[in-house]
Image (tube, rainbow, N blue to C red):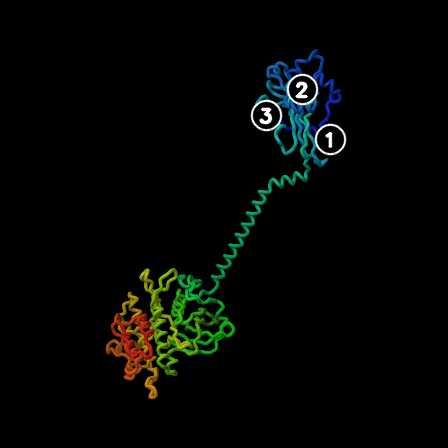
Amino acid sequence: MLPPMAARKTRRARKRGAPRSVAADEPRAERESIGCGSRPCDAQETFARRSPPSVRLLPHRCSARQREFSPLRSVSPHLSRVLGIICYCDGHCPDGKQNGTCELRPGGYCFSAVEEVWDSELREYVPEWSFGCLPPAESGFMQCKGNQVPHYLDKSIICCNHTALCNKDLFPEITYKSRPTMETDTRMVIASGAPLIILVVALSAALVIVVIAVGIMYHKCRKKERDPCLVQSQGTLKDLIDQSSGSGSGLPLLVQQTIAKQLAMSQCVGKGRYGEVWLARWRGGEKVAVKVFFTLEEASWFRETEIYQTVLMRHDNILGFIAADIKGTGSWTQMLLITDYHDRGSLHDYLQTTVLDHQALLTICSSIASGIAHLHTEIFGTQGKPAIAHRDIKSRNILVKRNGECAIADFGLAVRYFSESGDIDIAPNTRVGTRRYMAPEVLDETLNTSSFDAFKMADMYSVGLVFWEACRRCVTGGKNSMVEPYALPYHDVVPNDPDFEDMRLVVCVKRLRPVIPTRWDNDAVLYALSKMMSECWHPNPPVRLTALRVKKTLSKLHIDNISIKIV
C-alpha cells in the first residue's frame, strides 16, 4: 500500500529480481561487523556503534533475511529531530524541495517500496520501485506494515529513519506466490464478476419469458374479441361453459365458431311460428336436430340457449343440448340450436299415427311428469340448479324417444327462480305462449308474477291437457277395442288458431274443460288419469297437483291396480 502523494515517477527493472546495491558485493563478514551481526538490525544500536564520523554506515547491508524480520527501522522522534534526517525520494518528492531528497519531519519515516506493474512491451509483470518520506501520523506507521497485508498484486515496503538517505539503498524483495499473466488476470476479473453476470442473464431470461407470456395472453384476448360469442349476456352463459352438469355426461362441448360449418343439413322435419327444425349430419354422419330461428326471434334463441346451459339442467326427460351457433351467409343470419335428434318426432305427430296401450301411455305420462318435476325442483349445493318453469308446455314441445319415453323441449319462454335472493328471472321477451294451452289465470291476466309457484301451477294446467291428448289414443275394450281419434284440447269449441278472447271466453267465463269420454270410467288406468287431469286443470291454481305429486302417483300406478287414490 503506497501513500497518496504526488504523481509517481517510475523506475522499472527489466529483471525479475531487485537490483543489487553497491554494497551488495562486499563480504558477508564486513556487513555483519558493520551492521547487525547475527540478530535483526536496530537503528539506535547502529547509530551508537559509529566510531569516527568518517565511517559510512550501511544499514541496508543487513541480509535479506534480517530485513525480512525488521521491515521498520526507527529511532526515537527526538533523535530524528536532532539529526535533521533527509530521505531519498524518487516518485514521491514534495514540490519546492531539493531534487531527489525530502526532509523527514519528526516521527516520520523514509520508505522504499516495490510493486509489480504490467509491462505492455514485455507482456509480463515487472517490479517498480519508489522512494520518499512518510508523514509522522499513524497512517504512515501503518503503511510501513503494508507488506504484511495480502494484495492481489505482489508488493512490499521497508521504512527507516535512523540516518540520512537511509532508504536510498533499501530494495525490498517480493515473495512471489504465483505470477499472474494478462490471460489469468483477465480470467480472474471475469470470475470476480461471474455472480453479477449470472444475475443479469437470469433477469433477462425472466423478462423475456414474461414478455412472451403477456404476448400470448394478449393474442388470445384479441382472438376472443374477434370471435362471435355464443350469447351476448352478462357473463352467465360464459361462466357456465366449463362447468359440469353433475349427471355424469357433463355439459356438451361447445364449438361456437365452427360447428355450423360442420353441419350438413338433410331435410326439414318441422316448422313452427318461431322457426324450423332440420335433420342434419354432424361429424361424419351423426344425426342431430338443428332448430333454425327466424331473424326476429333472437331473444327466444338467446333465452333457450341460456336455459340449456343452466347447471344440472341435463336429465333423461329433458332434450339433450349439444351447441348453439350463429351462421352468417352474407345477406342474412341464421341462429342455430343443435340438440339430440329423435326420429319419432313430437308427441303431437306421434299420437296422430300411433295407438297406445296402457304401458305405453303410462311411460309417456310418467316421463313427462319426471321432466317437469326436474325443472320445477331447485337443487341446492355448490353448483345448484334454480327452479325453472317452462311456460309453454304442449304436445308439440314434447319429443318421443325410441324407448317410448318423452323429452321436454323449447325453453324460449322459461323463467328461473333463485331462492337465495328471491329473484324470478323472466326474460325480456315479447313472445307469448300457445293460447290453447294457457291457464285461466294467464288468460284473464290474474297471474301473480311475483310468485314462482304461480308459474309452476300454470305449467301443471298445461300438463293436464297433454295427458288428455295421450289418453284419447289409449285403446281399451279388449276385442271390441275403442280409441278416439287424435284431437287438440278444446278442438270442438274454439277455431284452429284461437285468439286470447276466444280462449278466455271458453276457459275463464264458461269454465269449460276438455270432454272426458265415458269409456274411461270403465278402465282403471284411464280413470285414474282422468282424476289426475281434473286436479291439474282446476280453476283455482293452489288446488292443482304438483309435478312431484303426479310423478309419485304415476310410479305407483299398475295395470292390475283398480283402486287408486289421488292425494
Residue drawn 40% across the image and 62% down it: 236
Q: Tell me the quarter of the picture where residue 237 sits.
A: bottom left
Q: Indicate the amino acid at tag 3.
A: Met
In space, the residues marked 2 and 1 are separated at their CA atoms by 30 Å
Label 2: element kind: loop
Label 1: element kind: loop
In space, the residues marked 2 and 3 are separated at their CA atoms by 24 Å
Give the percent coordinates (x, y) of residue 445: 27, 71
Q: Look at the image and tell me whether residue 296 can be seen.
A: no
The answer to whether residue 344 is above or below residue 258 is: below
User: From the viewer's perspective, is 520 left or right of 69?
Assistant: left
**The disc label shown at residue 39, or none:** 2
Q: Indicate the amino acid at tag 2.
A: Arg
Label 3: element kind: helix
Give the percent coordinates (x, y) of residue 259: 48, 69
Which residue is disc 3 drawn over? 142
Which mark's residue is nearer the viewer, 2 or 1? 2
The number of discs equals 3
Give the percent coordinates (x, y) of residue 452: 30, 66
Residue drawn 60% across the image and 41% down it: 193
Q: Indicate the amino acid at tag 1.
A: Lys
Give the percent coordinates (x, y) of residue 58: 70, 18
Q: Residue furthest top?
A: 52
Q: Nearer the viewer, residue 145 or 129?
A: 145
| Mark nearer the N terminus (2 vs 1) | 1
User: From the viewer's perspective, is 259 left or right of 307?
Assistant: right
Q: Residue furthest front?
A: 560
Which residue is disc 1 drawn over? 15
The answer to whether residue 118 is above or below residue 330 is: above
Q: Look at the image and tell me whether residue 127 can be seen.
A: yes
| Mark nearer the N terminus (1 vs 3) | 1
